[in-house]
Image: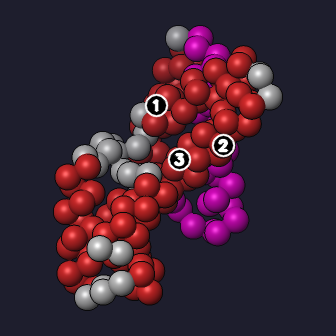
């Protein structure tokens, strides 16, 4: 079953179960997917849907920090709930060892020798880790690896 079909099925299940918050979050996701399809005049595949979900999760993380700084715990809790719903549509996250192995493989395949080659390594690992790892953390690990 494609990810798009799974999301639609989950929306129907949330409607039947009268889960208003979950339904609202799934509808936000479907709207973001539809917007991307209309803007780019394409049909989204699973990888593109994962990119949309990843972007939405990043927005929610940023919102949580801002809401907590403004002492708005109610809004921060809502964003956290949306994050749990959205995270269900991401593939299984990579372990620390798997991330390190992919970085080492990318460094070897690109022949990276130092920080100026960081872009090459990021480009090599980005497709393999999309939606499965926090790319900011991966970037920091690559930087640490290339400065050794």
Give the magenta range. 18-46
- Does 70 appear above or below 35? above
Task: Answer few, some or many: residues within 10 Å of disc 1's Cα (few below 14, many 20 plus, some between 14 and 19).
Answer: few
- Kindly identify which residue carries mark 1: 9
**Residue 96 is one of the magenta-drawn residues:** no
- Kindly identify which residue carries mark 3: 53
Closer to the chain start, of discs 1 and 3, is 1
Q: Residue furthest top?
A: 17
Image quarter of the C terminus:
bottom left
Q: Nearer the viewer, mark 2 or mark 3?
A: 2
Image quarter of the N terminus:
top left
Q: Are marks 1 and 3 in contact (CB under 8 Å)?
A: no
At horizontal 64% and vertical 59% (from top left) the residue drawn is: 36
At horizontal 64% and vertical 21% (from top left) the residue drawn is: 77
Image quadrant assignment for residue 82: top right
Nearer to me, 11 or 92: 92
- Does 10 appear above or below 3? above
- Place of residue 22 in the rendered image (x, y in percent of width and height, measured from the top left): 58, 22
Q: Residue furthest front?
A: 148
Closer to the chain start, of discs 2 and 3, is 3
- The answer for how far apart the CA atoms under marks 1 and 2 are is 29 Å
What's the mark number on residue 132? Answer: none
What's the colour scheme? secondary structure
- Place of residue 110 in the rendered image (x, y in percent of width and height, measured from the top left): 28, 86
- Place of residue 48 in the rendered image (x, y in percent of width and height, measured from the top left): 49, 59
- Kindly identify which residue carries mark 2: 62
Element type where label 1 sits in the image:
helix
């Amino acid at each position: 079953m494609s990810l798009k079909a799974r999301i639609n099925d989950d929306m129907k299940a949330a409607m039947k179960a009268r889960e208003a918050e979950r339904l609202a979050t799934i509808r936000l996701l479907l709207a973001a997917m539809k917007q991307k399809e209309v803007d780019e005049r394409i049909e989204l595949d699973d990888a593109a849907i994962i990119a949309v979900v990843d972007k939405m999760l990043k927005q929610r993380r940023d919102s949580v920090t801002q809401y907590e700084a403004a002492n708005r715990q109610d809004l921060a809790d809502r964003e956290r709930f949306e994050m749990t719903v959205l995270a269900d549509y991401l593939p299984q996250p990579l372990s620390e060892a798997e991330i390190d192995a992919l970085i080492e493989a990318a460094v070897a395949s690109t022949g990276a020798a130092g920080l100026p080659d960081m872009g090459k390594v990021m480009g090599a690992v980005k497709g393999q880790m999309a939606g499965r790892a926090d790319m900011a953390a991966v970037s920091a690990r690559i930087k640490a690896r290339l400065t050794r």
